[in-house]
Image: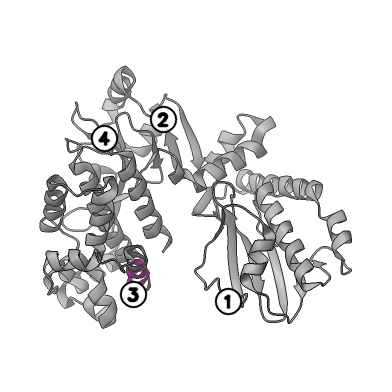
Amino acid sequence: MSHSFSMASNATLDYKTVINNLDVKNLKLQESIDESSDWPQGYLHYYIDRISCRSIEISYDGHTYAVRILSGSSIEDYELALNFTNTLASILDVSIESEDHEKLLDLDSFNDIYNLEWAKEHCERMVELIVGMCIQKKEVLQLSGATKNFSVGPNFVESLLNKPESVEYLFFERFRRFQHIESEDIYVGSKIILTNKEETLQVSEAVLGESVTTLIPIDVDAIAISSEEQDSFEVPTNAFVENLSTPSTLLSEDYLLVEGISGDDWLALATKLQPFKLKSVLEVGKPVSKEEREESVDDRKSSSYRESFESEEWEKLIYAPFIVFILVAAADGSIDSKELKAFSKALEKQENELLLEILRHNSQNPQEIMEFLSTDDMNIGLLFKEIIDAINQKLSETYAFRFKATIYSIAEQVARSSSGFFGFGKKIRKQEKEVLNVIAAVLHEA
């Protein structure tokens, strides 16, 4: 479903020369490389900030340069791929091979065939294929987007077909917006995982706050309805979606963009959802398998978390909660007493077993940690990514998710602490929302 162009050459290219010849504004690279050296062997993925839906893939094995366009790419992604192909072929002074063409093509012949008209036709055909698969096979497809995975399934496609003449436009408009949602003043909701005391049930929920435009995950078991004026309560996700009458847009199969609801509209929604109110959110919980429970018990008995990490990795883990505290609390330029109190309380009431073990074995006091992280040459963003990489590599998916959810929860508690009430999102300031979105992205993508 993808499409590739290749150029045979043993020549080593200067990285900056290629990028400068592209002349593309806001070009982003997903990988981290030394951009002052030659073009590296391996795979690189490029996208245009706030424009691309998917990245394009550039590979080099020492003998061949290749440009690959992924299925479901937007017309702008196609144009970027054609630009890269032209630039590489021009600098290398070689012919181009296309996977659907028998002969090698010189640059003029290539541009005669693979032009904007070809790109539009190919782009449209790929959308038709993806939509068709979702309709006929009732499948949910996962597309690796420019910044995050994008789910396309029957519900998402059905929402597009409400305007059949605009399916392609709506597909890419939503795909693009989902990829770059952090650039907007929108609260990106997270999944919260809860278990009962016996760990026989597990439930996932997300939160919708009054007056907050929220990108809310709907592949959860329940939605918490939170307001400053009223008591919060939870309802099953399907009941929430079915009874939501205010403007909303399905940005992907599992994320719904809900415009801020306030005043009488919020009261009307809360009233409408009252019949579905859960006595306990665990009513919609899912059973935890015996194997998962035994794994949890074994972890507690052996305290084996420390044994899973190299010494250097373990020593870094303590910095994770302090990093998100610094990032969120300093988002407005200063750290106040409410934020410090909220952070201390979050650590004191901590229940995550890994974080508790980290805190027990930590030999540094909080002041020393804060001073270390605040030194001029400290890149806390890179350190945070290294920590999350280690968590993902050394723990099972379940336990890695729980730790990351805990770290994000700490960040949220700090962000809410200066809002004047213990609610979700309503008064979280724009700067703190942006930082929370960045933290969520690192936790999700690392």
Name the front one of labels 2 and 4.
Answer: 4
Q: Position of residue 122 (x, y in %)?
A: 75, 50
Cα distance in 3D space between marks 2 and 4: 15 Å
Residue 396 in picture, x, y percent from top left: 34, 69
User: Disc 3 or disc 4, which is closer to the eye?
Assistant: 4
Residue picked out by circle 3: 394
Real-space CA distance between mark 1 and mark 4, rounded to the nearest whole angstrom = 46 Å
Mark 1 surroundings within 10 Å by alpha-carbon count, few (fewer than 14), some (14 through 19), many (20 or more): few
Region of the chain picked out in magenta, as a range: 386-397
Q: Earlier in the sequence, mark 3 or mark 1?
A: 1
Residue at 33% across, 49% down: 436
Q: Which residue is mark 4?
A: 427
Q: Nearer the viewer, mark 3 or mark 1?
A: 1
SS at circle 1: loop
**Residue shown at 40% from the left, 38% from the top:** 186
State yes or no: discs 3 and 4 in contact (Cβ < 8 Å).
no
- Circle on res. 37: 1
The answer for how far apart the CA atoms under marks 3 and 4 are is: 37 Å
